[in-house]
Image: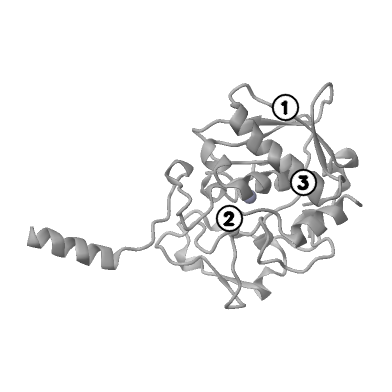
């Protein structure tokens, strides 16, 4: 028994923070966000990427007409789950002064289909791609409200904040701590492809990865230049997120 206790003490002293490797292992205490755990491009982005995507797509073809986003829920959703997603619709509308609205699809051919494949991660396409496009919300994604908004923000036309061309002025990517094969999640885009929509780099963006995203060893993969900055919040859209969205959609 003494040996066991000693082992427990030693192993907990040496314990590295638990970084889940899949969404199913995610809990609210995890050091990373649920949508950072998918096996997709950058964790939660479905390919193909539009060719012109600082983190918002510059090409207007990938925007939703008049800021109206038609949607449809798959039959898997319970009313409780629908109410979480509807809260995000309401927040987008109120934060943008009614400029961005989600409305239930009637006959529109371009729309978002919300699905709940829990064998897969949370994911979205970037921008309106045409036809039916999926946002997948397994329960662990719905459990983190900011991740619900995060996926919608992709579909409205934005990449991750740390993909901005100027990110190296604000964060240092710790390549040696990243899981082998996951390095592509930290790609950045040239300013010819993505735009900042009038806003500076935002540590507080709901689109910024957390400090431990794709960590292989429990060490940070992203270190902020400002030592007091916090990244990876998933409470909800930041004011800068809202401003960029309103600039993109000419609100
Ligand atoms: Zn994402």
Residue 144 at x, y percent in the picture: 56, 47
Inter-mark Cα distance, 1 to 3:
17 Å
Q: Mark 1 vs ligand 1: CB under 8 Å? A: no
- Numbered label attached to residue 25: none
Q: Of the two numbered discs 2 and 1 on the same chain, state the one appearing first in sequence.
A: 1
Residue bearing mark 2? 185
Q: Is residue 71 visible?
A: yes
- Residue 224, quarter of picture: bottom right
Q: Is label 1 in contact with label 3 (beta carbons under 8 Å)?
A: no
Q: Nearer the viewer, residue 3 or 223?
A: 3
Q: Mark 2 vs ligand 1: CB under 8 Å? A: no
Q: Nearer the viewer, residue 168 or 151?
A: 151
User: What residue sits 63% from the left and 59% below the top?
Assistant: 208
In the rendered image, which quarter contains the N terminus? Answer: bottom left
- Secondary structure under tag 1 reads strand
Residue bearing mark 1? 72
- Secondary structure under tag 2 reads helix
Residue bearing mark 3? 92
Q: Is label 2 in contact with label 1 (beta carbons under 8 Å)?
A: no
Residue 228 at x, y percent in the picture: 59, 76
């Amino acid at each position: 028994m003494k040996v066991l206790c000693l082992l427990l003490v030693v192993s907990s002293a040496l314990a590295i923070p638990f970084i889940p490797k899949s969404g199913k292992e995610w809990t609210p205490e995890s050091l990373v966000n649920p949508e950072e755990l998918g096996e997709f491009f950058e964790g939660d982005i479905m390919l193909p990427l539009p060719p012109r995507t600082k983190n918002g797509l510059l090409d207007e073809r990938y925007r939703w007409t008049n800021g109206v986003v038609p949607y449809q829920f798959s039959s898997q959703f319970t009313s409780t789950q629908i109410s979480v997603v509807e809260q995000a619709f309401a927040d987008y509308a109120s934060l943008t002064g009614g400029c961005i609205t989600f409305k239930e699809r009637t006959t529109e051919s371009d729309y978002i289909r919300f699905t709940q494949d829990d064998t897969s991660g949370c994911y979205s396409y970037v921008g309106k791609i045409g036809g039916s496009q999926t946002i997948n919300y397994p329960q662990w994604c719905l459990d983190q409200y900011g991740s619900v908004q995060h996926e919608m923000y992709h579909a409205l036309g934005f990449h991750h904040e740390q993909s901005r061309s100027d990110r190296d002025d604000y964060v240092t990517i710790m390549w040696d701590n990243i899981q082998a094969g996951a390095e592509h999640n930290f790609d950045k885009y040239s300013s010819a492809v993505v735009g900042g929509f009038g806003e500076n780099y935002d540590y507080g963006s709901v689109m910024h990865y957390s400090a431990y995203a794709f960590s292989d060893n429990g060490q940070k993969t992203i270190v902020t230049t400002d030592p007091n900055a916090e990244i990876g919040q998933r409470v909800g859209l930041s004011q800068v997120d809202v401003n960029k969205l309103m600039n993109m959609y000419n609100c």
